[in-house]
């Protein structure tokens, strides 16, 4: 089975919600059951190493990084970039222009994130005015459509800095498309994949036809949207939202354990 999980505030207990320290128990189960481990995150390679040191998480078999724009594979205990993913994204997004998208975001009042948070296929911004969220997201989607740029706008919220995070990505380079690329490459069926998340940039994957787990500490609006998306797709039974109970308070790793039990994986 392919076990794919977001990192921050999903696998990693680094949000404001209380942790009950179930991460070591979860990691032992993943190892004992010999699950293929993939991290699916907004983090880059350097940030992953920081998380490994801070939280003692193992090197994964695969790392879908920077919201799906980069894919790494574990080769002899070292993560190496999978260039076939880069080539596919470039091939399917021939008119991609990062600077044009950076200018577009700034024209909507967004602040560009630091240079190290950007890459060729990812234009990332901070949104410091929550009241403008819906209008800005709508405007960006409309302009991209008018310009015929094959891109998606992904929103999430970082409670640690009290700001919205907006990524403009190629339609072919997001968490779910990268995960689908990996699933097909490894020849797993949809039923052989479990995905865990907590935020808006997990929504596409949470309704992608896999067994999915939304941890209890996810924002209410994400839970509501995930429910609605899965009901619309007819895949409501594939989504489990942790509530807390026998496996702990439902936040972070204990929520994942709860979901794995629901799907009879443990």
Image (spheres, rainbow, N blue to C red):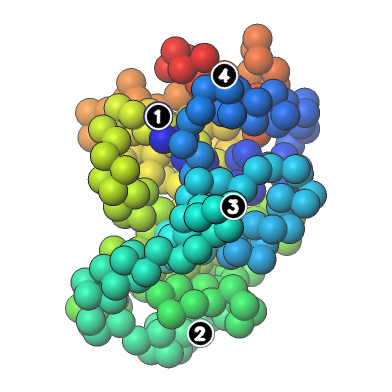
Q: Is residue 18 left or right of residue 96?
A: right
- Mark number displayed over residue 63: none
Residue in the picture at 70% in, 31% down: 23
Q: Where is residue 261 shown, x and y percent of the image?
A: 51, 14
Residue wearing tag 2: 106
Q: Quadrant of the N terminus?
A: top left
Between circles 3 and 4, the one closer to the viewer is 3
Answer few, some or many: residues within 10 Å of disc 3's Cα (few below 14, many 20 plus, some between 14 and 19). Answer: few
Residue in the picture at 52% in, 14% down: 266
Label 3, label 4: how many angstroms apart (C-alpha)?
Answer: 30 Å
Residue wearing tag 4: 258
Residue 32 or residue 111, whichever sits in front: 32
Between circles 1 and 2, the one closer to the viewer is 1
Between circles 1 and 3, the one closer to the viewer is 3
Residue wearing tag 1: 1
Pick whichever of labels 1 and 4 is earlier in the sequence. 1
Residue in the picture at 49% in, 77% down: 119
Q: Is residue 8 left or right of residue 90?
A: right
Label 1, label 4: how many angstroms apart (C-alpha)?
Answer: 17 Å
Residue 129 or residue 57, whichever sits in front: 57
């Amino acid at each position: 089975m392919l076990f794919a999980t977001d990192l921050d505030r999903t696998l990693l207990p680094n949000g404001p919600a209380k942790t009950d320290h179930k991460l070591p128990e979860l990691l032992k189960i993943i190892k004992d059951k010999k699950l293929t481990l993939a991290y699916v995150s907004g983090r880059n390679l350097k940030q992953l190493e920081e998380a490994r040191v801070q939280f003692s998480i193992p090197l994964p078999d695969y790392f879908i990084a920077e919201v799906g724009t980069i894919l790494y594979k574990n080769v002899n205990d070292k993560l190496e970039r999978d260039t076939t993913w880069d080539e596919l994204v470039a091939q399917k997004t021939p008119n991609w222009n990062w600077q044009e998208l950076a200018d577009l975001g700034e024209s909507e009042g967004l602040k560009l994130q630091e240079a190290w948070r950007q890459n060729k296929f990812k234009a990332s911004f901070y949104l410091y005015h929550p009241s403008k969220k819906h209008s800005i997201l709508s405007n960006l989607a409309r302009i991209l459509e008018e310009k015929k740029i094959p891109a998606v706008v992904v929103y999430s919220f970082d409670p640690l800095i009290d700001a919205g995070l907006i990524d403009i990505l190629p339609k072919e380079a997001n968490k779910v498309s990268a995960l689908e690329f990996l699933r097909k490459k490894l020849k797993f069926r949809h039923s052989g994949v479990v995905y865990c998340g907590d935020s808006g940039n997990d929504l596409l994957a949470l309704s992608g036809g896999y067994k999915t787990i939304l941890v209890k500490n996810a924002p209410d609006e994400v839970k509501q949207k995930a429910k609605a998306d899965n009901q619309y797709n007819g895949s409501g039974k594939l989504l489990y939202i942790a509530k807390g109970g026998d496996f702990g308070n439902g936040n972070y790793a204990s929520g994942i354990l709860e979901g794995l039990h629901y799907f009879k994986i443990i």
